[in-house]
Image: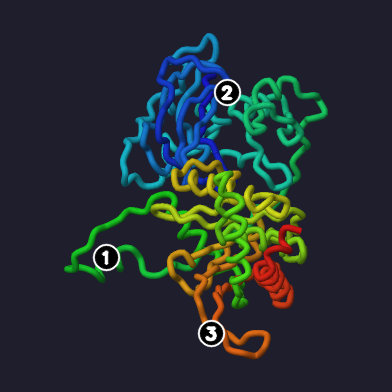
Amino acid sequence: MPTEILMPALSPTMEEGTLAKWLVKEGDEISSGDLIAEIETDKATMEFEAVDEGIVGKILVAEGTEGVKVNTAIAVLLEDGESADDIDSSAGSAPKQEASSNAAPAEASEQTAPAKGHGRGEGPATPAPAAPQKDGERIFASPLARRIAADKGLDLSQIKGSGPRGRIVKADVESAQPGAAKPAAAGAPAAAAAPAAAPAGPSTDAVIRMYEGREYEEKPLDGMRKTIAARLTEAKQTIPHFYLRRDIRLDALLKFRATLNKQLEARGVKLSVNDFIIKACALALQEVPAANAVWAGDRVLQLKPSDVAVAVAIEGGLFTPVLKDAEMKSLSALSAEMKDLATRARDRKLAPHEYQGGSFAISNLGMFGIDNFDAVINPPHGAILAVGAGVKKPVVGEDGELTVATVMSVTLSVDHRVIDGALGAQVLDAIKNGLENPVAMLA
């Protein structure tokens, strides 16, 4: 029977995407690993690789279609000996979705609903089984592999995938040992439905009526803006934020930075204040390891390395690329990596693993002249540091005399479920000490 090619989940949080471009056409022969389409997620356009071999029998979703749900059939793949006549009526008669910049998220219909009977044919009219999971994580397997596993009674969670990104393919299932047999499912009551979320403000119609007679331009939300809105709403509704503020004197850092940049000029390296902030935060998380943690629903995960995310503004939104093992890297290495990540973020060329993860984030609006602000935590991070501009201010020196210093105001937003007040204060103090004694950060 023909195999359906499904809309892939290209990141752990992806629920839908835009089929930006087909790289194959009907009748083309493809092999595992071939690039067949470009998929636009909420933050990046990524290439989609085939996991099975065969002939593209029918394309079900047109280029440019937005809001295609993960696991929606987007094309039909024919195996050896099969022809277009073998495509079942539900797939063969499904009209292609029209490309539209205003397309609504795909509704459950004949062409977009999860296929019946293991993804092919009519089968019994029962809901499609949930994607297999292992330790709470979704298991990725090709439709053909899932069908063979079901026919042989194999448990996909016991099979190691050899396809792209660990996806289970036909060969893995066919070579699986009998020990991978699926255990009998114990009867379990259906999970209680989650309570409906409270509406977030007035409805669209109510807002439009409110501004009748006023001139305005309607701006449809793209995938990135929808995701940002959803995640920030989730963060403010579910994370118990509290805020810690400190003033940091930058004069020693600015003097040290000028000396280093003069020495590094021949190598084409120019360190920014932000590079020092990244390093100071990374070292502070090592000094206060209990704060290097994330919220995981029913537990806290305490990380060993300092993986620090840094907010990068782009047109229409922002990315938070993650500098992994930041405590181990030199200032020049952090500077080069940050410049590369920021450049590719603005071009929307980052892969999901480059902007997901981390335990701590930095948002620096000082370059825009902002003195201080409170940042919203990016879940599941435990904290985020909001950085303001360095401004010359009158201060009392150690000798008690009034003097002028360059002072930077920072605010640490903290998830109280992960980090208590005293622990947050220790982290912020460690960051302050690092920035006011920059030479020690190189020791």
Question: 322 left or right of 328?
Answer: left
What's the CA distance linking mark 3 and mark 1?
A: 50 Å
Q: Secondary structure at mark 2?
A: loop
Q: Which amino acid, by three-letter code, is at mark 3?
A: Pro
Q: Which residue is mark 2?
A: 33
- Looking at the image, which residue is at 69% across and 50% down? 329
Query: Is residue 417 at least partly visible in the picture?
Result: no
- Looking at the image, which residue is at 70% across and 48% down? 136
Query: Is residue 437 at least partly visible in the picture?
Result: yes
Q: Decide which of tag 3 and tag 1 comes sooner along the chain.
A: 1
Q: Position of residue 363 (x, y in %)?
A: 54, 63
User: Which one is in front in this view, the residue at disc 2 or the one at disc 1?
Assistant: 2
What's the CA distance linking mark 2 and mark 1?
A: 48 Å
Q: Which quadrant of the rendered structure holds the C terminus?
A: bottom right
User: Which one is in front in this view, the residue at disc 3 or the one at disc 1?
Assistant: 3
Q: Which residue is mark 3?
A: 394
Q: Secondary structure at mark 1?
A: helix
The single residue placed furthest to the bottom in the displayed view is: 400
What's the CA distance linking mark 3 and mark 2?
A: 63 Å
Counting every numbered tag in the picture gives 3
Q: Which amino acid, by three-letter code, is at mark 1?
A: Ile
- Looking at the image, which residue is at 52% across and 59% down? 231
Give the camera-side residue of 430 and 184: 430
| Label number found at residue 208 | 1
